[in-house]
Amino acid sequence: MLRANYHTHTVLCDGANTAEQMVRRALDLGFEHLGFSGHMDPDIHMDWPAYVSEIDRLKRAYGERIDILTGVELDNTFDRSCCPGAEYVIGSTHFLPVATETPMSVDGSPETLRRLCDEFYGGDWYRLTRAYYEFEAQVHERTDCTFVGHFDLVTRFNDQMRAFDEGDPRYLAPALEAMERLVSEGVPFEINCGAVNRGRKRELYPRHELLRALNDMGGQILINADAHQAEKLDGGFDVAVRTALACGFTHVNILAHEPDGTVGLRQLALDAL
C-alpha cells in the first residue's frame, strides 16, 4: 500500500474537512507522509499565513507519528511569490492566460468550458487544447514546481461532452510536446486519482496513452489522490499503481523530510506496493 499523499485540500480552500481531520484519517490509514496543498489561484486563494500557521500547529501535535509537509497547489497564472516558505509546489493549469470578467477554469463546469472555447478560441476545441498545452509547457518555468499536477486537466468534462477526440493528432501532438519539454526540465508528473475516485472520469490524469509516453520519455511519477474529502485520502491508489505498472513504470516517488529538515524525493518500487 502507498502510505503517502501530497495533493490534499481542506476547508482552508475548497475541501470538506479540516486539516486536522485529514491528519487523523491519514493516521487511521497508516500513512507515513501527508502533504497539504491548498489552492492559490485566481478563483480560490487562501490566507497563506493562516494556512502555514495551522499546518505548523499540526506538525507540532502529530509530527512524531507522521511526516507532515506544507505544500501548495499553485496555478500557472498566479504569482509564485504568494506562497513563501512552501516546502513543495504542485504546478497546475486550471486557467488559461486570457482576460475574463470572472475566473474561467477548464475544470469549473461544462458550460464555463464551452463559453471559454467559444469566446476565446472561436469554438474550435483543438485551438483551445493546443493553447492549454502550450501554456502547460511553461508550468515549471512559471511556478518552479516540484511536480506537475493533473497534466491533462483540460479533459475533465470530455467523457460527457465528447468535445474533442483525445486520440486525434491535433490533440495529442501539443500534449506530447508539452510533456517532452517538462520531462527535459527534470520535473516529475503526478498520477492524479481525483476525478476517478470521485466518479467523474473513467481515466486517471494523465490518461494511459500519455502515461506510456511519459515512461518512454524517461519521466518520473508520484501518485496522489487529490483528496477534497477525508474518505478519499487514498482513493484510487490501487488503480494508479496497476496503471503505472501497465505503462512500464517500476518506481514511484514520494516526498519526505530529510534529517536536516529539507524535503527530498525518494523512490519506492511499485511492485512492492
Image (cartoon, rainbow, N blue to C red):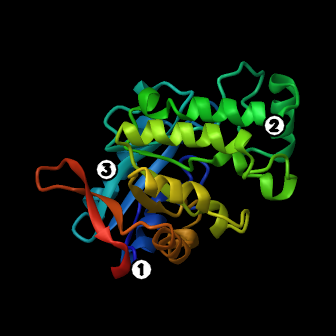
What residue is shown at x 46% (from left), y 27% (from top)? 142
Q: Secondary structure at mark 3?
A: helix
Give yes or no for contact between labels 2 and 3 (Cβ–Cβ under 8 Å): no
> For the residue marked with disc 1, what is the amino acid?
Asp
Q: Is residue 25 above or below residue 50?
A: below
Locate residue 88 relative to residue 245 in the image: left or right. Answer: left
The residue wearing badge 2 is: 125
Give yes or no for contact between labels 3 and 1 (Cβ–Cβ under 8 Å): no
Q: Is residue 24 above or below residue 15?
A: below
Quadrant showing the C terminus: bottom left
What residue is shown at x 60% (from left), y 30% (from top)? 134
* In this rendering, the label closer to the viewer, 3 or 1: 1
Looking at the picture, how far across and down is residue 72, in whole percent? Answer: 44, 43
> For the residue marked with disc 2, what is the amino acid?
Trp
Looking at the picture, how far across and down is residue 251, in whole percent? Answer: 34, 67
Quarter of image, res 84: top left
Q: Which label is found at residue 9? A: none
Q: Residues within 10 Å of mark 3 (few under 14, many from 20)?
A: some
Q: Which label is found at residue 28? A: 1
Q: Secondary structure at mark 2?
A: helix
Looking at the picture, how far across and down is residue 91, in whole percent? Answer: 48, 40
Q: Secondary structure at mark 1?
A: helix
User: Can the viewer see residue 206?
Assistant: no
3D distance between C-alphas at marks 2 and 1: 44 Å
Q: Which label is found at residue 56? A: 3
User: Who comes first in sequence, dot 2 or dot 3?
Assistant: 3
User: Who comes first in sequence, dot 2 or dot 1?
Assistant: 1
Q: Is residue 204 above or below residue 12?
A: below
3D distance between C-alphas at marks 3 and 1: 21 Å
Quarter of image, res 184: top left
User: Can the viewer see residue 183?
Assistant: yes
